[in-house]
Image (cartoon, rainbow, N blue to C red):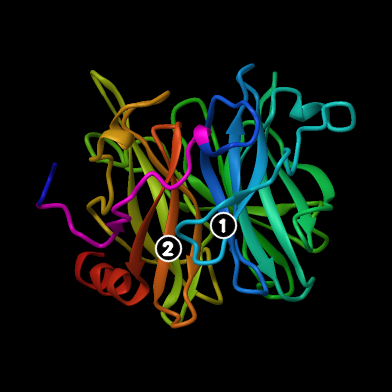
Amino acid sequence: MNHRSPQLFQRYRHNPILTAANWPYQVNSVFNPGAAILQDGTTLLLCRVEDRRGHSHLCAARSKNGVDGWEVDARPTLMADPEHYPEELWGIEDPRITFVPELDQYAIVYTAYASGGPGVALALTKDFHSFERFGVIMQPEDKDAALLPHRINGLWALIHRPVSPNNAHIWISYSSDLRNWGTHKKILEARLGGWWDANKIGLSPPPIETSEGWLVIYHGVKQNAAGSIYRLGLALFDLNDPECCLKRGKEWVFAPEEPYEERGDVDHVVFPCGVTLAPDGDTLNLYYGAADTSIAMATGSVRMLLQWLNENG
């Protein structure tokens, strides 16, 4: 274990918190959950569940304290619907959840997967029982997307990660109706060469709104002779102009170290899609997929993350 890595996130000592063994029906793996705190204080994780065909759907797990005592929906919460949405033919994956006060609904931005590659899809829900589906809003190849919780200069804003032949950077796009998106701008570039985040980066959980700006936890993928390593870094963007990156850390801040992160269906992966903020406005729970096999949790402090960025950005 690398004891010199900055300890900005503390793993829950009983990780992983959810595995396929917790599911009420037969599945291969559960990972990459979106997260939300419901009005009654319950933490909801919308988990990516891969069945034994290799296709994924989304299933909710709820906990009063966001740590244990999870109650998993008896059947899939949101299934792919290839009959009406053919771009979901091979499943739906990696949800990011944003509560949108103006709509009084949760926006779930997820990946729709079919022969054309992964695309970005959107659904709205009030209760995680019924959903209004918008279908694909960013065509393949595009993923790792989340909606900002309120309009910016009158327009909705979507962070996402389109892929070109040689690299993958983080972009922002705008819309007046959540359906038609334009004014696409690159906001964070993957670095080049030997960096931990060279060539391929992507948004992890939805950006966290702070007094200093939008705090973004993103993943970087390092390719080496043994394969890929997924690690996390930090960046900060202007609140009123989220295209403007104010700070970006040079080093990664969280990496696969524990056995459940190092070995699984995909080795060497920590991949958060969900984060929740405690009532104190500082303590955050980071929910992440571990090795594409199970779900784990780590806690951190917004204040400490911002302080680290000030010192290392």
| Coordinates of residue 45 in the picture (x, y in percent) | 58, 53
Viewer-side residue, 264 vs 255: 264
Rendered residue at 54%/34% (across/down): 163
Rendered residue at 31%/69% (across/down): 305
Q: Is residue 105 left or right of residue 270?
A: right
In this view, 228 is above or below 4: above
Rendered residue at 73%/44% (across/down): 77
Rendered residue at 59%/37% (across/down): 23
Q: Secondary structure at mark 2?
A: strand
The amino acid at mark 2 is Asn
Disc 2 residue crowd, few under 14, some 14–19, many 20+, Cα 10 Å: many
Q: Secondary structure at mark 1?
A: strand
Residue 11 included in the magenta stretch of the image = yes
Res. 75 visible in picture: yes
Task: Give the quarter of the image for residue 128.
Answer: bottom right
The amino acid at mark 1 is Ala
Tag 2 residue = 285
Tag 1 residue = 35
- Which label number is shown at residue 65? none
* Quadrant housing the N terminus: top left
Disc 1 residue crowd, few under 14, some 14–19, many 20+, Cα 10 Å: many
| Coordinates of residue 98 in the picture (x, y in percent) | 64, 62
Residue 2 included in the magenta stretch of the image = no
User: Which residue extends farthest left?
Assistant: 4
Q: Is residue 244 left or right of residue 173?
A: left
* Quadrant housing the C terminus: bottom left
User: What is the magenta range?
Assistant: 4-21
Viewer-side residue, 259 vs 185: 259
The tag earlier along the polypeptide, 1 or 2, is: 1
Q: Is residue 76 left or right of residue 158?
A: right
Q: Is residue 30 left or right of residue 106?
A: left
> Tags 1 and 2 in contact by the CB under 8 Å rule?
yes
